[in-house]
Amino acid sequence: MLDIKFVRQNPDAVKENIKKKFQDDKLAMVDEVLDFDQKYRTARTRADELRAMRNQKSKLIGGLMAKGQKDEAEAVKAEVKAMADEMEQLAEDEKAYQEEVRKRMMVIPNIIDPSVPIGKDDSENVELERFGEPVTPDFEVPYHVDIMESFDGIDLDAARRTSGNGFYYLKGDIARLHSSILSYARDFMIGRGFTYYIPPFMIRSDVVSGVMSFAEMENMMYKIEGEDLYLIGTSEHSMIGKFIDTINEEETLPQTLTSYSPCFRKEVGAHGIEERGVYRIHQFEKQEMVVVCKPEESPMWYDKLWQNTVDFFRTLDIPVRTLECCSGDLADLKVKSCDVEAWSPRQQKYFEVGSCSNLGDAQARRLGIRVRPKEGKELYFAHTLNNTVVAPPRMLIAFLENNLQADGSVSIPAALRPYMGGQEKLTPKA
RNA sequence: GGAGAAGUACCCAAGUGGUGAAGGGGCUCCCCUGCUAAGGGAGUAGGGCUCGAAAGGGUCGCGAGGGUUCAAAUCCCUCCUUCUCCGCCA
C-alpha cells in the first residue's frame, strides 16, 4: 500500500511502476484515486466545519440551560437540528469516498526496487547465483515418495482415508528427519541472533484480512466452524499480526524473529504431477524469519535473510540457487523478492524451497506498524521483511534426493547428526 | 463454558449527560539551596485526518465498533481484554 501523499505528488511514477509490472488495467485507478481523494477532502472539510458549528452551539445550549433560559436553548437546538441532514449526508459521502480510495490503494502495487528485473511472469525470473555443484548421480534417483517408502517412512493411503488428498503420515526415520531439520533450523537461526517464537496457530478474521487480500484468503485459509478463527497459512501471519497498530520505540529495532509453526493451506486449483507426493500439501511445518526494521536497513536485511537460507541448505549438502522475481511476478506489496531453490537430481532442475521478500513500508502502512524516532517527533512506518528458513516436508524432497547413495541409503550431514541420535546414515528397510 | 467486577496518559487515579478530561506519582526544564537531602515554579493526552505559504485553526479521540441526544468518558447494544469465583481439561 502506497502513501496517498506520494500518489498525489507523483502520479506519473505510480503509473510508470504499474506499467513495469504489466498491470495496465490498473492505470486508470491512479486518476480515480486522485479524483475520489479530492472529493473526500472536500466533503471532509465541509463536514468538519459543520461539526465545529455544532460543537459551538451545543456548548451554547449547555450555557443557556444552566441559566434556565429554556426557550432560547430550544431555538438553538432547532438550528442544530436543521443541519442534521447535511451532516449525515456528508458523513456518508466521506465514508464512501474514502472507501473508494482505499479499495484502489489496496491493489495499486508498491513501487518496486530499481534493481528488480523487468519481466512479464515467472518465466522471466532471473537466476542470480548458484551455491554448490548441482550433481547428477550415476544411478537413478527415485521419486521422493518411493525413497520415503524404502525407509517405511510415509503412509499416504492412510492419510487419504483420514483426511483426504494432500495430507500425509510420516513415520520412523523419515518423521524423525523431519523434526530434526526443524530443530536444527531453530538452533541455526538462534545462533544468528534471531529470537525464537512459537506463535498462535489460529488468528482472528480481522488479522487475516489485514495480512492478506480477500482472494488470498479464499484460496488459502481454513476457517474454524462456529468461531472467528482461521488456521494460519504461515507463521508470518501471526508474527506480523502481532505488530498491527503498534508504535515501536526506535531502539527496539531491528526485531529479528524466527518462528516455528505448522502451516495450513487450501491450495485451491489444479497442480501438475511434480506437485504430488509431499510437494504441495494442505499441511506442512515451517521455520520462518521475520524482520521489522528501520527503512534504511531493509536492503541490508534482505541480503542477510536470503543468505541465511542459502547457508542453512549448504550445511546440509544441498545445492541451491537464488532466483530473483521479475517485476511481473512480484506480488503487489513487495519491493523486491527472490526465491531460494534447491537442486533436484531426479528432475535435473531447481525447485522452490523458500521465498525472501522485502515489503518496504507497504505492509507496515497497511497494518499501522509505526516507529517513534529517538530524535524528533514524527512517527514513521517500519520496513518489514520475511523469509523461509526451511519448510518440510517439501524440503525432505531435496534432502533425500541430494543425500541419497547408490546403495539406497541416505547420508546424514554432520550438522544434522546431533538431532538424529548421532546416526551417520539411514539404511533402507528390507 | 457459567456468574460477578473492571478497562481513562508512562504509572496510580477522579470524573453517572452540559462551557478547556480533576489530582497525584514519574519524567523534562528552570529557580532556590549548595557536595547529599529538601523546597519552589513551568512543561508533560497521544495519534489520525483536514484547512493554511506560515503562524495557527478545525475535526476525531476515555478498550473497539455501533446507537440514542442539540450535546456521551458518562445512557443503550455488540464485541475484545483483564481480574475474582465456579465448571471442564493436556
Image (cartoon, coloured by chain):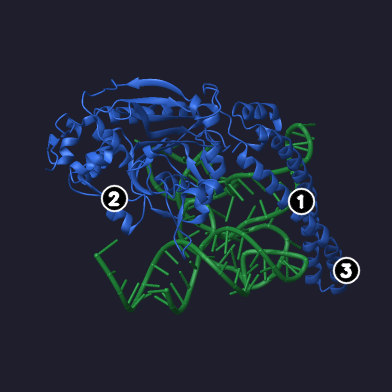
Chain colours: A blue, B green
The residues tagged by marks 3 and 2 sit, at their Cα atoms, a distance apart of: 79 Å
Local SS, label 3: helix
Q: Are marks 1 and 2 on the same chain?
A: yes
Relative depth, front residue between B66 and A145: A145
Q: Is residue A59 left or right of residue A258?
A: right
Q: Is residue B32 left or right of residue A63?
A: left
Q: Residue A410's quadrant in the figure?
A: top left
Looking at the image, do the residues carrying marks 3 and 2 touch, with CB atoms under 8 Å apart?
A: no
Q: Earlier in the sequence, mark 3 or mark 2?
A: 3
- Label 2 sits on residue: A156
The residues tagged by marks 1 and 2 sit, at their Cα atoms, a distance apart of: 63 Å
Q: Earlier in the sequence, mark 3 or mark 1?
A: 1
Q: Amino acid at mark 1?
A: Asp
Local SS, label 1: helix
Asked if residue A245 can be seen in this view, the reply is no
Which marked residue is nearer to the observer: mark 1 or mark 2? 2
User: What residue is at 80 percent from the left and 49 percent from the top?
Assistant: A46
Residue A248, horizontal then vertical, whole percent: 48, 42
Residue A145, horizontal then vertical, whole percent: 27, 41
In the image, which disc is placed on residue A75? 3
Q: Earlier in the sequence, mark 1 or mark 2?
A: 1
Q: Are marks 3 and 2 on the same chain?
A: yes
Q: Chain of mark 1?
A: A
Q: Chain of mark 3?
A: A
Q: Is residue A151 left or right of residue A164?
A: left
- Label 1 sits on residue: A48
